[in-house]
Amino acid sequence: MLGLLEGGPRHGYDLKRSYDERFGQDRPLAYGQVYSTLARLLKNGLVEVESEPGAGPERKKYAITDAGVSDVTGWLDRPEKPEPYLQSTLYTKVVLALLTGHDANDVLDTQRSAHLRLMRDLTRRKNDGDLADQLICDHALFHLEADLRWLELTAARLQQLAAQVRA
Amino acid sequence: MPTEPLLTAEDLHLSFGPTTALESASVEVHAGEVLALMGPSGSGKSTLLHCLAGILTPDSGRVTYAGRDLTALHDNERSALRRSEFGFVFQFGQLVPELTCVENVALPLRLGGASRRAALRSAEAWLERLEVSDVAGKRPGQASGGQGQRVAVARALVTRPKVVFADEPTGALDSLNGERVMQLFVAAARDTGAAVVLVTHEPRVAAYSDHEAVVRDGRVRAREYVR
Ligand SMILES: Nc1ncnc2c1ncn2[C@@H]1O[C@H](COP(=O)(O)OP(=O)(O)OP(=O)(O)O)[C@@H](O)[C@H]1O
Ligand SMILES: [Mg+2]
């Protein structure tokens, strides 16, 4: 949500709409969730309120602070802990990178690197281990490989995705 | 890594007619390490590998091996260096079809001036090491794909090269065979201290490397990210 504010200040309902449009396929945000998140961000100094006279919570406009911007950058730069079924988080990161002018390739490369590091460990464990180790490690390796294949495909379609996201 | 790299490509540019294959590609290979070159099809991985190996000469930029500028060497000096210092494994073994497998492995030693007897003895040891002694007397056409690739690995390592270049060495194999080839290949390369430059698009093959470098649009993206 914080990342969506990088484009400019927004009202809470506006933010919910644009979040649901891009990421809410399975579960749209509840209004309560939007405002409790904004309150937390406000407390942590990551957003600030641009006041409009006589405004209730629905009329407040929220703007990202410098601290907020570096928080988003930090999140994008940090790989997710490699584990299967990360697609939705990774998808969110890629879309957000495209929206905020970060290099989406960097997000993908950082993640590939984190995945490969774990795959190297598992490969070593597998090759030093007995058959049970081999089978267990292979299971994890095949899942991580599936993530990486998705990353490669996404990287190959970044331009297309960028055009859609920015449209 | 603190040591000097063994092999360096700096700012390589190379075009095939209107197609730009490399556009300011730079990469370093350290002695004894396994480096995976990854990246999309057509991004320039094979071209970069061929430049590093002195098979292709870039339009501009420099390839340095152990302090020597490969691009400045004469063709015959470069082939001599390739023969004595480098080994090669390609997707399809590229073994000489008229020779038996053991003769194929012995060939680089023979070309280097070894006696037939010594060359064959050493070749047999390498085939055994790669668990394909049983195809020694067969022609490559009579060996399976996986066996053929192991023979190709033996042939690449028999001269104890400093760098082995491998372009999709498991690309034509199923995953079980591919893994076994990688396991034997990397273990043998580590034993002889050879560095390996490995082009692959398979993550489980790349997992046998120490580092990866990603080639995209003829450039190399950061080699590895900090933890
Ligand atoms: N001999 C050649 N003549 C003309 N164009 C070439 C030649 N070799 C490579 N190219 C072109 O240069 C670019 C890079 O090719 P290269 O073979 O290095 O890619 P690659 O990353 O190895 O791809 P792949 O994963 O498909 O093997 C491509 O656009 C390719 O078509
Ligand atoms: Mg290629």
Image (cartoon, rainbow, N blue to C red):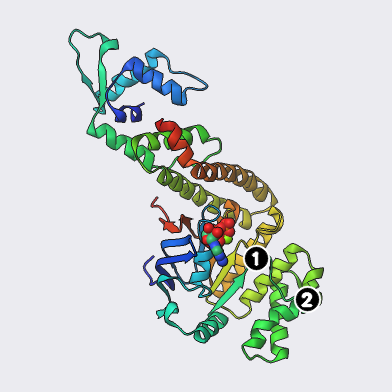
Query: Quick one: label 1 or label 2, which is nearer the N terminus?
Result: 2
Near-viewer residue (A166 or B70): A166
- Give the spatial CA distance, label 1 vs label 2: 17 Å
Q: From what the image shows, is residue B86 above or below residue B24?
A: below
Element at label 2: loop
Whether label 1 lies within 8 Å of ligand 2 gets the answer no
Near-viewer residue (A157 or B188): A157
Q: Amino acid at mark 1?
A: Leu
Near-viewer residue (A48 or A159): A159
Q: Which residue is mark 1?
A: B184
- Which subunit holds the residue at mark 1? B
Q: Looking at the rendering, in which quadrant would you find the N terminus of chain B?
A: bottom left
Q: From what the image shows, is residue A2 above or below residue B71?
A: above
Residue B137 visible, this angle:
yes
Give left or right: position of A15 versus B35. Answer: left
Near-viewer residue (A124 or B44): B44
Q: Residue B19: percent from the left, percent from the top? A: 49, 60
Answer few, some or many: residues within 10 Å of disc 1's Cα (few below 14, many 20 plus, some between 14 and 19).
some
Q: Nearer the viewer, mark 1 or mark 2?
A: 2
Give left or right: position of A98 versus B167. Answer: left
In the rendered image, which quarter is residue B169 located in?
bottom right
Q: Residue B146: percent from the left, percent from the top? A: 73, 63
Q: Residue B185: percent from the left, percent from the top? A: 62, 67
> Which image quadrant shows ligand 2?
bottom right
Q: Which residue is mark 2?
A: B136
Residue B163, label in figure: none
Q: Residue B134: percent from the left, percent from the top? A: 80, 72
Q: Residue at x 79, y 70 (%)?
A: B141
Q: From what the image shows, is residue B172 above or below residue B90?
A: above
Q: Amino acid at mark 2?
A: Ala
Q: Residue at x 53, y 74 (%)?
A: B55
